[in-house]
Amino acid sequence: MKARVQRSLTLKSMIAFFAITLFSFALFLAIQFSYLLEQRKNDYLNQLSNAVVQIQKPLTHSLLSSDLKEVKNLLVSLKTSGIMGKAIVTVDDTTVMSLDFATPKPIPDWAVKLVGIPVDMTIPLYAYGNTSLLVKPQGYLTLQVDSNRVYRFAVNTLALMITTYLLLVLIMAIAMTWCVSRMIVRPLRKIALDIQDTNRTDDIQVSDYHRDDELGLLAKNYNRQEKNKIRIKP
């Protein structure tokens, strides 16, 4: 009775290639996702930094004159950037004004830790534009990027990357498995079936492509052993 293959080498190789390729792409995905996320967060902060330059001096003068209405108007003008989430003005560790520019929405805790929310920056406000380290700032302006915008970008980017890379992993696994099947599994299966044939009298043959590799060596050694058995027989 001929033995039958219980677990195909093709299936084993496909699973192995898929696992290795998936791990490699997962590592690459994590690195690229972190890079894209940090780049986008830096872009947001640069936009806020460029926007606040125009109001920095007027805002400091308004604080000096205690004109809170003008302070609010200046902060509201930052809303035109489209990415503003929150603005906080503090003087001597006391919050003078806090404005929310975006409707807060619940964000999962895992996303807060993974994405690094909130994304904010703090700008010192010096009187008369004096930025000397010896001079105490008149106050501080803390700008926060809209957390919902950052969260949506992270989720959409991650979903797109996972879908794309999973498709690439599947395509690569199938392609590599097909190559292994054509080059190794099929010839090896043919040799195994030929060896199982007890009525076989001729030598095991392999294609010219495998004559100088391990499969060719296996066939030659088997043929040699069979010939030696015939010679030894009385």
Image: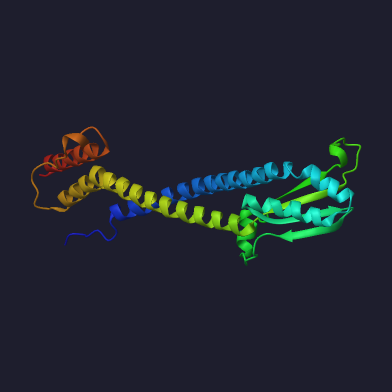
Asked where in the image residue 49 lies, by quadrant, the reply is top right
Figure label count: 0
Locate the C terminus by quadrant.
top left
Q: Nearer the viewer, residue 32 or 188?
A: 32
Q: Going by the image, does 85 lie left or right of 152?
A: right
Whole-percent x and y of residue 176? 32, 45
Q: Going by the image, does 114 lie left or right of 220?
A: right
Asked whether residue 11 appears in the rendered view, the answer is yes
Q: Which residue extends farthest bottom? A: 106
Colour pattern of the rendering = rainbow
Whole-percent x and y of residue 82? 61, 53
Whole-percent x and y of residue 118? 68, 56
Residue at 91% x, 37% y is 134
Q: Nearer the viewer, residue 71 or 103?
A: 71
Asked whether residue 119 appears in the rendered view, the answer is no
Asked where in the image residue 224 lies, by quadrant, the reply is top left
Relative vertical location of residue 95 with respect to residue 194 in this rendering, above or below: below
Whole-percent x and y of residue 227? 14, 40
Locate the N terminus by quadrant.
bottom left
Q: Nearer the viewer, residue 178 or 219?
A: 178
Relative vertical location of residue 204 with respect to residue 196 in this rendering, above or below: above
Q: Going by the image, does 62 lie left or right of 43?
A: right
Q: Going by the image, does 23 lie left or right of 84?
A: left
Residue at 42% x, 48% y is 21
Residue at 36% x, 52% y is 170
Relative vertical location of residue 152 with respect to residue 64 in this rendering, above or below: below
Q: Which residue extends farthest top? A: 212
Residue at 83% x, 46% y is 60
